[in-house]
Image (cartoon, helix red, strand yellow):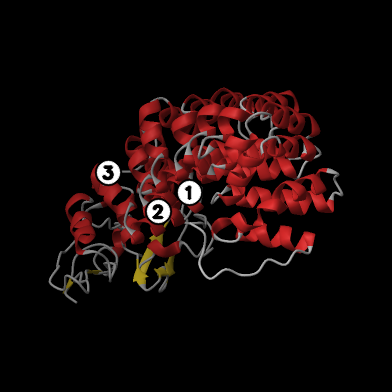
Amino acid sequence: MEKSTTTGVTASMCTPTGTDPHMIEALTQNLGNLCVVQDHHHHHQASTPITTTTATTHSNPVLTETLIQPVSDIGCWGSPQQQQQQQQTNPLSFNPLLSLEYLGGSSSTTSSSPFLAAAVPNYYYYNSNHHQKVDQLLLDTNGINISSIIYYVGRMEGQSFIRFATSPEGSRLLQEILKLKDAGGTAHIFRQVLPSMFHLMMDHCGAYVFLRLVESCTTTNPTHLTLIIHDLTRDPHAFLSLILTKNGANSLKKLLKLLKNSPLVFNIISLLASQFYPIMTHRSASYVISECIDQLDPHHNSLLHEAAIAHCLDLAIHKQGCLSLYKFMDNIQGLQRHRLLDTIAANAVFLAQDPAGNYVVQKLLALNNPAFTAKICGLLRGHYAPLCFQRGGSHVVEKCLHTLHLNLVLQELLANTNQLLQIAKDRYGNYVVQKALIISREAESPLYHTLLAALSPHLDLLRFGCARNVHNLVHEATKLHIPPQSTPLK
């Protein structure tokens, strides 16, 4: 440590350790010199020395800089009149980050908030009434001493601020500053965040700064919150690029929680509705709309419900979209629910044959709504046999067998014995025939014995391959003994 004797008060320069050398370089080059408060009591000037400390880091041990600057060069927030008043009442208020009021105390008390981190060892605070000494008040976050960085924050601008906000250390520090909900500090961070808001939201560390800023603005400056939401939603293409990233989607989910009681949430809902299809067909982005359904009431989600109705068929035949559609099928209520489910039921034949759409039909049948179940089973009449040969379609037929329309399905399967045998030997159809035998027996349907009578004469054809389970069910039911064969039938 080097010492020099001059006018002023005692100060100590502590640079964070363990931080990225690029961040340190950016801080020293762009944030200006360390702000040192000069003693306005001139009779103390000759007796109190200024002490500066060589700045070092683990990764850059040679970084040395004497960072002393007169207080007259320090920038501060507020109007010129407010600055003049601050200077008269408290010399530290040249920079609100150094003022006792900003740090959680007051200019007339000795309150020592945990965030009196700006106080460096042996540093003297002065105000119009008295001065007080604050000893060893350093804020240490996971071993990183950030007591000196707080001096810099008030003067950080542009890309330097963004690099700082997107670093782990900088993100933690800015969050602590925003927790104080100080109007001046929040306003400065707001001015730096707004032009690069999308970049911060897509960054893992920067997203936390953005969300803490939004939370702070809700109490310190609602106008700033309005400007944030306006800039966030004014460009649909930029918004879509944001939400299609994992960090961006997570940021928006958390933002919705903060805004759920604010009318500003309608701005976001409106934009989500206008970009509904690309959002619902993206895995991460679709969770943002799911968050709306979970957090907001039906009145807020009305636009999303309308968008779901308009896009339901396109979503139903999309691999990710069909899964996203389930959320609306479970939660939508009232007339909008009827319109959505009726649209799906009316297109059951088309959807049942689609690799993704069949899952939506199965989902609707699982809701056990008598009206929609009857509509689906009626529309599928004449299509049950062809569906049995399809992977997804066979599952739809099995779902129909579990309904009150069991006999309707059995009648179509029994209409052609040769076709029934082909279904029983098919890789997918055999499961339908097994399910038909089991359910019809449990339901004591008269068609159960008709089904057995149709299959039992052909047990030899059902012994091997995919049909062997059908063979076993029929054989057990009819109590027939079929001698084993040494080779399977071709």
Q: CA distance from mark 2 to mark 3?
A: 13 Å
- Sequence order check: which comes first, mark 1 or mark 2? 2
The quarter of the displayed image where residue 408 is located? top right
Res. 92 visible in picture: no
Which of 140/65 is in front?
Answer: 140
Please give the label number shown on residue 212. 1
Whether residue 93 sits left or right of residue 56 in the image: it is: right
- Identity, as a three-letter code, of the amino acid under mark 2: Leu
Please give the label number shown on residue 174. 2
Q: Are marks 1 and 2 in contact (CB under 8 Å)?
A: yes
On screen, residue 44 above or below 203: below
On screen, residue 459 above or below 376: below
Please give the label number shown on residue 157. 3
Which of 411/326 is in front?
Answer: 411
Q: Residue at x 47, y 62 (%)?
A: 115
Q: Residue at x 74, y 52 (%)?
A: 437
Q: CA distance from mark 1 to mark 2?
A: 9 Å
